[in-house]
Image: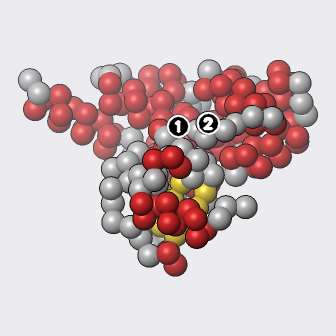
């Protein structure tokens, strides 16, 4: 269970020691941030704390475009059964769930699929599929920022099964299509020339 009062006090201090360990969701804006975000501190009654970016996304919150919480580090204190989750996340980042299901991932880790899902819920407050989606979106966003690849190629390299699924994921998460991120990247490249 997350200690609300202690976490809210840390949020008010912009405590960097909790960066990646907790994520701050704001009910009134529908956005979640890192505890170090420079945005104005929201009222306590509007705040919900999550243990992972994927959990905040699963609850319907969009990442803050200022502090980019979807790229925050994971908690450095992962040990014990968290090691299994850490290994699973590493495999997910390498595309394991792009090629197979949760059952195959669990088999590679030597645990059952239900147990792996419970471990993810306990340590990240999200399912392996939600974490995979979050990673795919992050990959796609990086590709959109750093390349001029066509949308279909970005979707494929990021691990999406189609451009449409990538577009749906971006629209759900950011409230806008992936093409809007490309325009920003193109505009900044034009300004730097």
Could you tell me residue 149's position as x and y percent?
35, 22
At 44% across and 76% down in the image, what residue appears? 43
Could you tell me residue 109's position as x and y percent?
83, 24
Q: Is residue 25 left or right of residue 36?
A: right
User: How far is the residue under mark 1 from the one under mark 2?
Assistant: 8 Å
At 66% across and 38% down in the image, what residue appears? 77
The correct choice, above or below, for 25 with respect to 93 in the image is: below
Q: Which quarter of the rendering shows the N terminus?
A: bottom right
Along the viewing direction, whichever of 181 and 31 lies nearer the viewer? 31
Kindly state the secondary structure of the residue where label 2 is placed. Answer: loop
Q: Is residue 56 left or right of residue 41?
A: right
Along the viewing direction, whichever of 18 and 28 lies nearer the viewer? 18
Residue labelled with disc 1:
73
Per the rendering, the mark at residue 76 is 2
- Marks 1/2 in contact by CB < 8 Å: the verdict is yes
Task: State the image quarter where residue 85 is shown.
Answer: top right
Kindly state the secondary structure of the residue where label 1 is placed. Answer: loop
Q: Residues within 10 Å of mark 1 (few under 14, many from 20)?
A: few
């Amino acid at each position: 269970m997350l200690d609300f009062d202690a976490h809210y006090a840390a949020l008010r201090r912009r405590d960097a020691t909790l960066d990646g360990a907790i994520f701050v969701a704001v009910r009134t804006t529908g956005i979640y941030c890192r505890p170090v975000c420079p945005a104005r501190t929201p009222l306590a009654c509007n705040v919900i704390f999550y243990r992972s970016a994927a959990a905040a996304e699963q609850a319907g919150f969009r990442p803050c475009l200022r502090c980019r919480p979807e790229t925050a580090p994971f908690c450095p204190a992962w040990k014990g059964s968290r090691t299994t989750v850490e290994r699973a996340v590493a495999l997910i980042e390498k595309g394991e769930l792009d090629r197979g299901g949760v059952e195959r991932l669990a088999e590679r880790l030597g645990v059952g699929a239900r147990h792996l899902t419970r471990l993810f819920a306990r340590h990240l407050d999200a399912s392996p599929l939600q974490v995979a989606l979050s990673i795919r979106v992050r990959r796609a966003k990086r590709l959109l920022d750093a390349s001029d690849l066509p949308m279909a190629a970005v979707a494929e390299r990021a691990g999406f099964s189609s451009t449409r699924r990538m577009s749906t994921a971006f629209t759900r998460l950011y409230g806008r299509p992936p093409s809007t991120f490309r325009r920003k990247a193109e505009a900044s490249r034009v300004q730097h020339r």
